[in-house]
Image: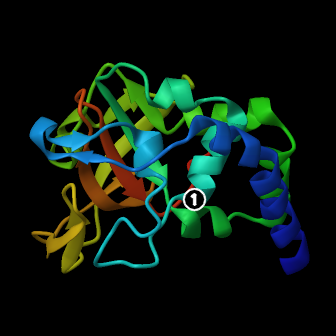
Amino acid sequence: MKVLRKLTIATLVLATAGVMVAGGMNAGWTAQQGGYAAPTQFFTVVKPAMDDPQMAFATLRKAVAYAGLAGTLDGQGPATIFAPDDRAFAALPSDQLNALITDKAKLANVLKFHVILGHAYKVRDLPGVKSAKSLQGGDLTFAVGAPIPKVVSGNRGQLQPAGGKTYTVNGADIIWADIPFTDGRIVHAIDKVLMPPM
């Protein structure tokens, strides 16, 4: 099982290497504009959350490139993007991960399920919104989950008091909230890969 997982992840890395090199993506924070330039650039940061050094988005970056969705994520906002970190992808069963890697259309469908176009929702807005239509077409449902003492938030990944609240999307915890981008898009890091309804 572990060997299969390593092979499938390696396949994704190899399949997307050329795309990433050709794109020349570099992470860049533009303080004067109040946000990162683009989500795919942000996902290249090896350890973006200073208080959680295990948080990284290499698998998501490769998956976005492989599925041909970099232009969609980096297109004109506003938009809300829920970004599974590497640990979220690693937690997928091997057969499920393999199915995504070998089917670009299915992978694109799953990734689109993590995006809301037309609205840049901050985490505090989500419980009031309750649900929203994803780019894939399925519904994303928001709730307040079990309380935790601290949460990573803001553009530099500062650990802050959570105020007794954890926010969820389709049952996945938002583990880093309100990461801003220059045209009004917002990214929230989550701890699970969201699967659209079949």
Out of 82 and 196, give the one closest to the viewer: 82
Residue at the image point whose x is 37% and y is 29% from the top:
132
When asked about the image quadrant of residue 88, the answer is bottom right
Residue at the image point whose x is 75% and y is 34% from the top:
106
Q: Amino acid at mark 1?
A: Ala
When asked about the image quadrant of residue 3, the answer is bottom right
Specify whether 84 is left or right of 183. Answer: right
- Residue 145 x %, y %: 30, 63
Out of 191 and 46, give the one closest to the viewer: 46
Mark 1 residue element: helix
Placement of 161 over or under 166, stated as above or below: below
Q: Quadrant of the N terminus?
A: bottom right
Res 135 visible: no
Q: Quadrant of the C terminus?
A: top right
Residue at the image point whose x is 22% and y is 48% from the top:
123
Q: In the rendered image, which residue does mark 1 sit on?
A: 58
Res 158 visible: yes
Q: Residues within 10 Å of mark 1 (few under 14, many from 20)?
A: some
Specify whether 78 is left or right of 6. Answer: left
Residue at the image point whose x is 21% and y is 55% from the top:
155
- Residue 76 x %, y %: 36, 19
Q: How many marks?
A: 1
